[in-house]
Image (cartoon, rainbow, N blue to C red):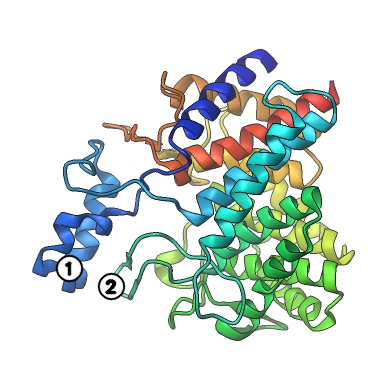
Amino acid sequence: MIYKVSESFSKLKAYCEAEKYKGWDPYDGLNSKVFQALPFKHWDLARLAWIQGFKRSPINFRKLLLVPKEYNAKGVALFLLGYCRLYKLAESGCEDFGTKAELLQHIKEITQLLLDLRSKGYSGSAWGYNFDWQARRLFLFQKHTPTVVATCFCVEALIESYEITKDETVLNETLSAAEFVLNDLSRTPHGEGLIFSYSIKDGNNTVINASLLGAKILSYSYKYKQNQEHAALAKKAVLAACDLQEEDGSWIYGLLPIQSWKDSFHTGFNLDAIETYQQNTKDYSFQKYIDKGVRFYVNEFFESNGMPKYYHDRTYPIDIHCPAQVIVTLSKLKVFQNHHDLLSKVLDWTIDNMQDKKGYFYYQLKKGISSKISYMRWSNAFMFNAMAHYLLEIKTAN
């Protein structure tokens, strides 16, 4: 299994490096130069239909319709997280995927790239996506509109980079993201806590994982700057999320009626964020919620052969996020070895069923025609980070 994963990862790594971490995304349809030349771009229903057409089509029309390959900040952050894991692996004596010097150079270059991708004009460092995105008919996210989700992934990656390079400028620029959470996101009271909004846009303040990622950012600020206000607000977001956890350990995605589903990788985000809060603040009062959540996560979202399920009550579509996130989450929770057999089965199944011979990973498998398009952020960056986590856990344990 170690050989199989190493060989698979080497193919993925070579593919992503050859592409220079640029690529397409499931939601980048509005980057089409053809669509931008049409009057339909001003109509929300047309924008929504265009995005969904690209996202759902098993055929990739992006080259034909002039959608360029670009950097996605969240994707770049995931690559940086992966390289930081590979650096730790090299530190332990395993240089199968690069020497310490080579990996350090990658880390420094990607760190600067990620800082350069910040959205301008906000209270602190913040990141968005490289495409316009129509969120149903509620609102239009213009490209580079910062979200707490993209920002949190970038913050965590840059913190990992700082721990290796000890570049104080990187640390200070990164931690300013706490001011973005404090000043640019709205807050909705819930019970004894609060819910942070998904972005600076009004009307998207009901998403549980997004709020927890805001808490995660604030907890990093507390860890390095000992800002008590940030720790207190982070705790309120964790309180609200734990209050919203159901007795079986599950979470719905959000509070609106159309957000009532339960899915695998957002459950992973929730658990990761609460655990990060605990590690950064040394406040372990939420452990029982993590324990319940982990039981639901590993028992309800994976088949006995390792096949990942998107939803707790049905399988399809099988999304590449699901096998990737479980590896990262259980590693963060320090229970990777407890679930080693499950994670190995999941990764084994994913390599066999979702990796192309060129090295990249597919987006989704469906009952009918599957989408085997290579998406740099959604598929390859997530798997790059996950496999780097897996290899560090397995090779250092051995």
Residue 360 coordinates in the image, percent (x, y): 44, 29
> Residue at image x 78%, y 47%?
333
Q: Can you say whether 300 is above or below 356 in the image?
A: below
Q: Which residue is mark 2?
A: 137
Q: Quadrant of the C terminus?
A: top right
> Residue at image x 45%, y 27%?
354
Residue 259 as seen in the image, left or right of residue 54: right
Residue 28 coordinates in the image, percent (x, y): 32, 54
Which class describes the residues within 10 Å of circle 2: few (<14), some (14-19), or many (20+)? few
Please give the label number shown on residue 41: 1
Compare residues 109 and 306 and report the one nearer the observer. Answer: 109
> Residue at image x 51%, y 33%?
17
The reply to whether residue 252 is visible in this rendering is no
Residue 280 as seen in the image, left or right of residue 57: right
Whether the residues at callouts 2 and 1 have beta carbons within 8 Å, the answer is no
**Amino acid on which the number 2 mark rests in the picture:** Arg
Q: Earlier in the sequence, mark 2 or mark 1?
A: 1
Residue 271 falls in image quadrant: bottom right
Residue 85 coordinates in the image, percent (x, y): 72, 38
- How many badges with numbers are in the image? 2
Residue 86 as seen in the image, left or right of residue 316: right
Q: Can you say whether 232 is above or below 173 in the image?
A: below
Compare residues 155 and 307 and report the one nearer the observer. Answer: 155
**Amino acid on which the number 1 mark rests in the picture:** Lys
Please give the label number shown on residue 157: none
